[in-house]
Image (cartoon, helix red, strand yellow):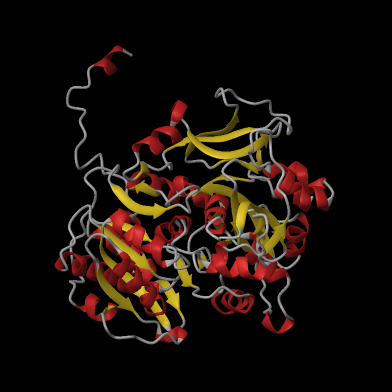
Amino acid sequence: MGWMRDETGLDKTPANYVPLTPLSHLARAAKVFPDREALVYGDTRLTYRDYHARVSQLASALQIAGVVAGDVVSTLLPNIPAQAEAHFGVPAAGAVLNTINIRLDVDTIAYIFDHGEAKVVLVDSQFLPVCMQAIEAMEGAAPLVVEVPDPIAGVPEIGKQIDYETFLAAGDPNFAWVLPEDEWESLALNYTSGTTGQPKGVVYHHRGAYLMTMGTPVTWRMTLHPIFLTIVPLFHCNGWNHTWMMPMLGGTVVCCRDVSAAAIYAAIADEGVTHFGGAPIVLNLLVNAKSEDRRDFDHTVEVFTAGAPPAPATLAAIGDLGFNVQQVYGLTETYGHVTECLWNDNWDTLPLDKQSAIRARQGVAFPQMEDITVMSDAMEQVAMDGKTQGEIVIRGNSVMKGYLKNPDATAKAFKGGYFHSEDLAVQHPDGSMQIADRAKDIIISGGENISSVEVENALMGHPDVMLCAVVAMPDDKWGEVPCAFVELKVGHEASAEALISFTKQRLAGFKCPKRIVFGELPKTSTGKIQKFELRKTFR
């Protein structure tokens, strides 16, 4: 045993230590799977040889445009090939990838450009007008704009900015990638929906993303050459890191710009899609699809679902259609999913309704995570009785570096040596977790996080509103939608339509309340609005 105390000569060298990065997956795939299809979108079919060359051109072109290591490159793109290429090409230039939600309003996009100090933005032609408005609203230096038209989807080039293919053509397909010297280097910058004020910038490192790509295939029981459909937006936790993962398996990424039942069924039938992730709304789309939108297929499609837990009835119905659905859970701060509803074969004998209820649990930690459990405010393990509530706390390598330019929020999030999710949950005797409430009052609508505080702030700007409170209202299509309870000023009148229209001028459409309920709000003796009383409306 004693000889291990002398480690003379046992040093890190280029031969035995390489910083972990998901970029290595595509570099390897170009050698191991050069002729396999890597990226598919309509008539576009890129092999791994082509994919690697285009990524290299993008990295080279970014450097020619003045991007240096550590700079931020933003995207305003749907799930099209350019968005997948940016996931490798931006970090291959040594830069940090910032994928922005295409549904955000002008002011929020302007804030993200300013806060992240974007040097370049790749923007789909459909969203170019919003992008340019956001740039006009910026306080800092404007980024270089590269327009990405999409003729396959009938989105023509506007033509006032340099177009993506012209920008790419200036790059070198043999460009030597800038790989991280330290796996702690920043890889991506993703903005949360924000619970108060402006969204927070979540910073990912190369190590965390790499380990996410290694843990996911274990949980999803993936083998070589899966065919993955991009339902989850690549601007949402970088598509749960799946695009970084697929080259490791020699898989094919099938891009899906507009999510519809017809598009999903067609991709499964025509492209042989084997895997996709999506919010419960996607499951509802498939279950309730019109007969003319359905297509026959003869294989089981594996599905990760996350967000608001899907209804047991939905899970039961979609299973009969050829989909095997697995509930997962995570946050922007954890690179996406970090817990899974790991199935126990003993549950196969339970009634179907009980099986579906179990499938809706958030479950247990992914294999690459160190510890995920439910703790009390005193950071003590709660009783695993399925009744005692606590907070889901998370420790592991797939946890963010922290919030950009916000050390106080970072310190609060990491208090006690765990990341605090602020999601309240119970833990069952087998260790599986199940969310009971959301401490941050986040509404999850169609997989998108909506801050009730942000909606309330918008409503409070209306001259007729005295008080308001926004809570989640169940919705068959979206899982949850915002419902606003409004107390008007004495002597004032306002219609629900007027208030909703007022919020639409200030918020992204999906954040606006879908229902307004007028009346006096329940309050504590100190004047605090009792949201739990309002939620009882929907029980």
Residue 514 image position (x, y, % from top left)? 66, 65
Q: How many marks?
A: 0
Give the residue furthest to the right: 351
Quadrant of residue 45 within the rendered picture: bottom left
Residue 235 seen in render: yes
Please tell me whether residue 430 is drawn above or below residue 132 in the rendered image.
Answer: above
Q: Which residue is pictured at 39% across the width and 63% down the height?
A: 107
Is 408 displayed left or right of 371 in the figure?
Answer: left
On screen, residue 110 above or below 13: below
Answer left or right for 359 relative to 420.
right
In-front residue for pair 346/525: 525
Name the spot of residue 414 as percent of width and height, x first. Answer: 43, 33
- The answer to which quarter of the image holds residue 13 is top left
Toward the viewer: 373 or 144? 144
Q: Residue furthest front?
A: 491
Residue at 62% x, 69% y is 498
* Residue 1, horizontal then vertical, whole percent: 33, 14
Would you say residue 300 is visible in this rendering? no
Specify whether 15 is left or right of 490. Answer: left
Q: Please report the residue visible at 53 percent of the width from the left and 75 percent of the height from the top.
A: 258
At which x and y percent is residue 237? 45, 55
What residue is at 44 percent from the left and 85 percent from the top? 152
